[in-house]
Amino acid sequence: MTHRMALLASVAPALLLALVSVPLTTLANQTEAQQLLSPPQKAASTVTDSARGVAHPELWPAAKSKGLVDAKTEAFVTSLMTHMSLEDKVGQMIQADISTVTPADLALYPLGSILAGGDSAPAGGDDRAGADRWVETASAFRTASLAERPGHVAIPILFGIDAVHGNNNVVGATLFPHNVGLGAAHDPALVRRIGVATAQETAAAGIDWAFGPTLAVPQDHRWGRTYEGYSEDPEIVRQYAGEIVQGLQGQPGAGQALQHGHVAASAKHFLGDGGTTGGIDQGDTDVSEDELIHVHGAGYPVAINAGVMTVMASFSSWQGAKMHGNKSLLTDVLKGRMGFDGFVVGDWNGHGQVPGCTAESCPAAILAGVDMIMVPNDWKALFTNTVAQVKSGEIPLARIDDAVRRILRVKAKLGLFEAARPFELKDGVIGNAEHRALAREAVRKSLVLLKNNDRVLPLKAKSHVLVVGEAAGDIGRQAGGWTLSWQGTGNRNSDFPGGQSIYDGIRQAVTSAGGTVDLSVDGTFITKPDVAVVVFGETPYAEFQGDIPSLEFQAGDKQDLALLKKLKAQGIPVVSVFLSGRPLWVNPEINASDAFVAAWFPGSEGGGVADVLVGDAQGHPRFDFTGKLSYSWPRTAAQATLNRARTPYDPLFAYGYGLRYADARATLVPQLSEVSGVDAAAANIDTYFVKGRTPAPWGFVLRQGAAAVPVLGDGTAAEMAGALALRPVDAGGVQGAGRQLSWTGKGEAAIAITGSTLDLTRQANGALSLQVDYRVDEAPAGTVWLASGTGPGTPGALDLTSVLKAAPVGQWQTLKIKLSCFKKAGADLSHVTTPFALSTGGTLRLSLATVRLSADPAGAICPGH
Ligand code: BGC
Ligand code: BGC
């Protein structure tokens, strides 16, 4: 496949965007969304508006922290605190990100904690660094925190990181399946063992604290963090919460966790993160108190009883009240009724979202019960302001003392005051064979077999297998978000030493039994295979960048479906291995597959897929499928809030579904409806022009001032007299797959939507870029502008002249422009109607092959910078 074709095929699938103003509520499920999981509770019906967001602790289950409080530790903490200054105390309550704080800063700002955010690099600045760099960073901060200074009590600093599927920021670490896959395994003991391994690999990198487990119970699968939750059902979360906590931390009260290779855990995000309306990240969970307790709260009493040392507050709101400011929940329920004796950490600038607060100042969050504030950048100002607020009496000293006692208690129980760290850089811990075998076992157990008509699976190892798709040989694609980078993008196989792709696992299993394997990204082959295994699915994402408007997979451009159909049309049995962070509507893809496996985001050990899919030489299974859905699989793309606890319940594959080899004969999956059930226009927010089509709701339009000529219908030509013309041309060897734009006067060629707008503001904070595959046919005579924004006259247009002048005439090129560049240049990305508008006043001839959003940051630029 040529490079150019690779570009054309590389259309990263539907990402990602929280779409605000498109009328999603018209999409169905309104009634469904209104149905509560359980009948509203007495107290809820008497809630008045002024009482919204205020919890009643007596309704909540009682719990009690185990192993955190004992007389000796408390006496030790008391003795430290008697000598601490106010500055020492406030410092303990502040956590800065390592991208903005240095060890030297600790001399002036005695901070209690540092974190490494998903995109933050250790010493040396390389965020694809191995454990030694992380240990170097950790020990530099530790040493600085322990430096003696007159009038100051030296206290070891606590270092936290998002070790959420293994110690996933460190090159060479074992990467376990994301929680969505572990939920399908229905195996609490497995989750505990994963906790143990993750803790060891975290401690070996010098890090003390994992920001997990996520105990969210995601209710709307459009939410980009669905994969961080084990299940839509509170029962599995309840079963897993204590196991993962004790795996990470060890037995409560066993003493000095770090010396035994354990780390502190953080149950997150308290509370209701998985219940936001519309599945919007950081949104409002507008449910009854009963539902908050029994659905979203299910894992917390268990985690507290298991000794969890920290709880992270949620960005989201409950009944309109931001969690970081909710005293009734953080203090009265969590620390009171639920007896939590550890400390509450805030989320990334989450305090700044409380009314009346900024990232730099937020007495309200401290008063509500947040003990340690995660303030990645603005920690200096927060420190100074908080000290002043205690001095002025705005924050009572007693609240500070309570917070500091909790933090020091955790530090003591964790073993931070002991010098010994036997696991730090210990040989053979990070990515060791035992951990990888465990991850591989977890992969096997997480796979869910949705369809196996004609018993295509297990594959007979002694056959010729074609492994297809760009994800097949790509470990980054199978690892998902929170992998080396925040969004999990930008990774190459060389970033995963010791890891194995799904393709490589299949190759090993098949060839060792005497069969043969070919890898083909685009499905072409020389020798006709006995069977094709196509690996495809969602590209990696994290947090709000994974929010989607509907459950339709590849709403704008079903390129993987085309691949499946192409193989099927040649009479080749097709096995689909689907990578995703949630169940998605894939009826057309299931129809085009003989067998269909939900593989979630399995992590670094792709070999686990082959263990189950590839049988022995004769085709007898080596391992059976045991995974069962922990999320209901939708029948239409509109069933975003499908849940077995809610009626009507009409899934395609119910919660708990999952075929085994023995019963596959009885369960033929029939031809499925290919009507998605959603307005296609509302589902496609990222694919504007591809393969000769402008998928709905997008269309080309030629403009000159206020005059506009819409291009009606794909494949048609159009002209704005005296300005410019558009006509179909070939691209990538495909007839009509491109559009040529020819300027003769001043005009703008745009791709636009009418009737609604997109809010891309928050996406512009991330790594998303506008990707344009283009060819200059005749170099520009004048200045050329590219804009993304609100349509004619939008501010923030970028000067593209030098890029186009430098491009070789007649050759296809890819240009990626970070959305943040448009924002920085002044574009309003909150009401986007025109994601692409190219204008010039001079002559220019240019052809387009692709215009879309891309999640892959590789090669993205800011023109003019
Ligand atoms: C996420 C947390 C995470 C934190 C630190 C936040 O944006 O919501 O889950 O632990 O960042 O990276
Ligand atoms: C950080 C993440 C954090 C996110 C919050 C990113 O820049 O790397 O750790 O969760 O910002 O929006």
Image (cartoon, rainbow, N blue to C red):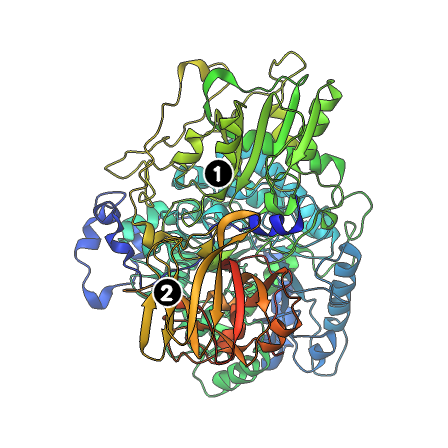
Report the residue that reaches farthest toward the right. 427
| Residue 372 appears in the picture as rendered | no
Pair 2/1: label in front: 1
Identify which residue, 55 or 583, lies in the foreground.
Answer: 583
Earlier residue among tags 2 and 1 = 1
Q: Is residue 125 left or right of residue 691?
A: right
Residue indicated by mark 1 = 562
Estimate the x, y position of residue 574 in percent, counting from the top left: 53, 27
Write the residue at 39% across / 42% down. 232
Helix or strand or loop: what does disc 1 sit on?
Answer: helix
Estimate the x, y position of residue 383 in percent, counting from the top left: 56, 80
Helix or strand or loop: what does disc 2 sit on?
Answer: loop
Estimate the x, y position of residue 739 in percent, counting from the top left: 48, 59
Q: How many marks?
A: 2
Binning the other alpha carbons within 10 Å of mark 1 as few (below 14), some (14 to 19) or many (20 upward) gives some
Q: Is residue 315 left or right of residue 291?
A: right
Report the residue that reaches farthest toward the top. 618
| Residue 649 appears in the picture as rendered | yes
Q: Quadrant of ligand 2?
A: bottom right
Q: Is mark 2 within 8 Å of ligand 2?
A: no
Task: Quadrant for the C terminus, please.
Answer: bottom right
Question: Which corner quadrant of the image does residue 618 belong to?
Answer: top right
What amino acid is found at the position of numbered circle 2 in the picture? Leu
Identify which residue, 333 or 120, lies in the foreground.
Answer: 120
Residue indicated by mark 2 = 758
